[in-house]
Image: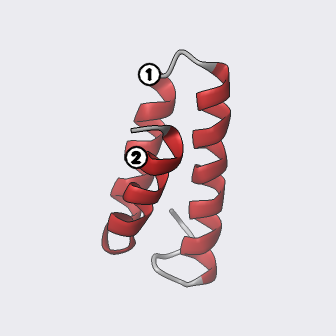
Amino acid sequence: MDTTQLGTFIMKLGAPNAKATLNVYNEIIKKLGSHQALKALNCYVEAYKYAILSLEMVSSEL
């Protein structure tokens, strides 16, 4: 599974568990060795945060 597939999978499952999903992303980012993979996942984190806040899935304190 590449980072694109992983990101898509996590985002599909993440809506009901937005905060937990961001925690998973952050843990994956900490463990990755590849700078390119790190940048890709970090883009997903930022996009996911934006989606969460714009759709008001969770409070802005997240």
- Residue that extends furthest to the bottom in the rendered view of this protein: 55
40 relative to 12 in the view: left or right = right
Q: Is residue 2 above or below residue 17?
A: above
Of the numbered discs 2 and 1, the one sitting upstream in the chain is 2
Q: What amino acid is at disc 2?
A: Asn
Q: How is the image coloured?
A: secondary structure
Whether pointer 2 and pointer 1 mark residues with C-beta atoms closer than 8 Å, the reply is no
Based on the displayed image, in which of its 4 quarters is residue 46 positioned?
bottom right
Question: Which residue is labeled 2 in the image?
Answer: 23
20 relative to 4 in the view: left or right = left
Of residue 62 and residue 29, the one placed in the foreground of this image is: 29
Judged from the image, the secondary structure of the residue bearing numbered disc 2 is helix
Q: What amino acid is at disc 1?
A: Lys
Q: Classify 10 Å Cα crowding around label 1: few (below 14), some (14-19), many (20 and above).
A: few
For the point 50% across and 62% down, the residue is 62
Of tags 2 and 1, which is closer to the observer? 1
Of residue 51 and residue 3, the one placed in the foreground of this image is: 3
Where is residue 58 drawn, in percent x and y?
Answer: 46, 76
Question: What separation in Å lies between label 2 and label 1 (alpha carbons)?
Answer: 13 Å
Based on the displayed image, in which of its 4 quarters is residue 35 positioned?
top right
Q: Is residue 10 above or below residue 16?
A: above
Question: Which residue is labeled 1 in the image?
Answer: 31
For the point 58% across and 51% down, the residue is 45
Where is residue 47 drawn, in percent x and y?
Answer: 64, 61
